[in-house]
Amino acid sequence: MVRAHRPPGRRGVLLSSGDHGVSRHAGGQRGARAAARVGRGFFRRGRGRRDAASAVGAGDTVCAAGGGVTAMRSVWVIGSLAAAIALSGGCGYSADGLYRSGIDTVHVAMFDTHEFRRDLEFLLTEAVKKRISSDTPYRVVDRRNADTILKGELLEVRESAFAPDFATRQPRDKQMTMVVRMEWKDLRSGEILAERPLLLQAIDYLPPGGESDAFAERKVADRMAARIVAQMFHDDW
């Protein structure tokens, strides 16, 4: 026999079983269902945290991989720019680097001189021709076939002696200095491509070591030729 009654202060109905001696609150079923829902909520929140942690880990992996891809893209872009710059010959520069484009040939006129030394102007002129042929993309030709002309003047050659030998009073160390004026002109347009009113070049040599004045003249002429040809670089360099 089961009877139902509502105890004072209780919201539910107490069910009593005479056969089994079991009683429980009728609202317990609703409480059990509520507890189940709360439990499921905790489980979902826990699973959400685990999923979030997994997502953060995956994101870290993606970010790391993305950083590598970004770095690879940066390297590729830099390499492409370098290749484009290397292959381009714009802005008036030739593919050979520092020299002007649009010029193929040069005529080197005999250098004028007022020096007493014989043949030094010939040494200088020949040295300039050799330097142009070996160090530039230009060809040395006669004036009739030339795009440009390079000419100049040997202004002075000076000798200085250092550290004379005590016994012989002969210099052990000498210096030879050459002073030159040069001009490079475009024969087609009349434009002055390069002009230097004063170029100086000095070399040291040792007469006691077998280095004669003739040796010094050849050496200073070659060094001056290199300095003259260096003036044929584009003005922007």
Image: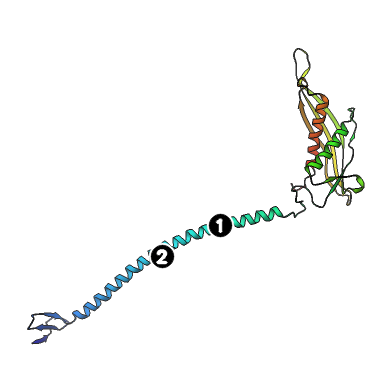
> Does 105 sit above or below residue 216?
below
Q: Nearer the viewer, residue 64 or 199?
A: 64
**Answer yes or no: do the residues labelled 2 and 1 have beta carbons within 8 Å?**
no
Q: Nearer the viewer, residue 196 or 139?
A: 139
SS for callout 1: helix
Q: Residues within 10 Å of mark 1 (few under 14, many from 20)?
A: few
Residue 108, by quadrant, is top right
Q: Position of residue 2 (x, y in %)?
A: 10, 86
Q: Left or right: where does residue 52 sit relative to residue 144? A: left
Q: Is residue 135 visible?
A: yes
- Observer-side mark, 2 or 1, equals 1
Residue at (43%, 63%) from the top-left corner?
Answer: 58
Residue at (87%, 31%) from the top-left corner?
Answer: 120
Which dot marks residue 55? 2
Q: Position of residue 210 (x, y in %)?
A: 78, 22
Residue at the disc numbered 1: 72
Q: Position of residue 191 (x, y in %)?
A: 86, 49
> Does 12 sit above or below residue 169?
below
Residue 113, by quadrant, is top right
Q: Left or right: where does residue 143 sit relative to residue 72? A: right
Q: Amino acid at mark 1?
A: Met
Give me the C-alpha separation between circle 2 and circle 1: 25 Å
Q: Left or right: where does residue 195 sit relative to residue 42? A: right
Q: Is residue 9 visible?
A: no
SS for callout 2: helix
User: How many numbered discs sit on the rendered protein?
Assistant: 2
Residue at (83%, 43%) from the top-left corner?
Answer: 195
- Quadrant showing the N terminus: bottom left
Q: Residues within 10 Å of mark 2 (few under 14, many from 20)?
A: few
> Does 1 sit above or below residue 125?
below
